[in-house]
Image: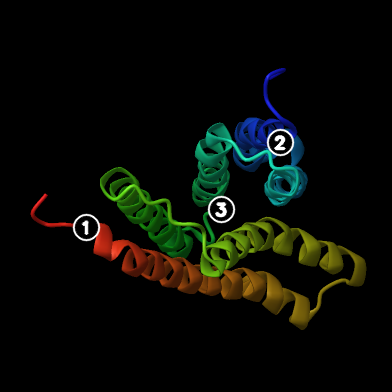
Amino acid sequence: MSKLNLPNRLTVMRLIMVPFCIAAVVIPEGWIGADLSAVIAAVIFIAASLTDMVDGRIARSRGLITDFGKFLDPLADKFMVIGTMLAIVYRYENIRPWFFWVVLIVVFREFAVTSIRLVASTGGGVVVAASWLGKVKTTMQMICICCVLLEPVIFRGFLSLFGDSPVIGFWLDHLPLTVVSSVLTVIYTIWSGVNYIKGCWKYLDAEK
């Protein structure tokens, strides 16, 4: 760690946070309660997401971009998002039947983009920079995870404060923020993936 610059240290920190976030999501409900575990997982996830925002800015502003950072930063992002999403599928039975497909689309997109990026870099010697769509996609995935973890907690809190309410009951039954953010995650995940593949398609040669 002593040889790493500040952005890379933040990236390593984010990677270390991943198993703790996953553990907080899947911890048995009887140990600390579902709401508390969700809040802890959300706090860790948000902290990890903030390091993702900060490390890139520091690296660019101070000229600290390294090959190690180029390798580890996107890997840490994928571990953080996909790992937490898989933990959510395991833990939350109420959204599992449809959230499973959200996770599957995210995983398939990452496989496709990583594969084509590898071909472009090794075959064409080209490194394709992340587009605005890719950044929006990552941000949307992070928002989606936060909605899944915190939306039920917030509205169960309202229910305990204000008593039985049809509006709050509807919100808890349907989780509209979770649903909307999941739909947007799917849209931006597919859109950014198709856009990336189109941009790199010229580097694929069927005869090689």
Say which of 199 and 112 sits in front.
199
Left or right, 156 with reference to 197: right
The image shows residue 105 at horizontal and vertical percentages of 39, 61
> Which amino acid does the dot numbered 3 rest on?
Tyr
Q: CA distance from mark 3 to mark 2?
A: 30 Å
> Which amino acid does the dot numbered 2 rest on?
Leu
Tell me if mark 2 has few (under 14), some (14-19) or many (20+) residues whose alpha carbon lies within 10 angstroms of its own. many
The image shows residue 71 at horizontal and vertical percentages of 50, 37
Badge 2 marks a residue whose secondary structure is helix
Q: Earlier in the sequence, mark 1 or mark 3?
A: 3
Left or right, 69 with reference to 195: right
Residue labelled with disc 3: 92
Badge 3 marks a residue whose secondary structure is loop
Up-down: is 17 above or below 57? above
Q: Earlier in the sequence, mark 2 or mark 1?
A: 2
Q: Residue at x 53, y 35 (%)?
A: 67
The label number, if any, that marks residue 68 in the structure image? none
The label number, if any, that marks residue 10 in the structure image? 2
Residue labelled with disc 1: 204
Quadrant of residue 62 within the rendered picture: top right
Residue contact between numbered discs 3 and 2, judged by CB atoms under 8 Å: no
Badge 1 marks a residue whose secondary structure is loop
Nearer to us of marks 3 and 2 is 2
Q: CA distance from mark 2 to mark 1?
A: 34 Å
Up-down: is 49 above or below 165? above
> Which amino acid does the dot numbered 1 rest on?
Leu
Q: Residue at x 52, y 55 (%)?
A: 93
Nearer to us of marks 1 and 3 is 1
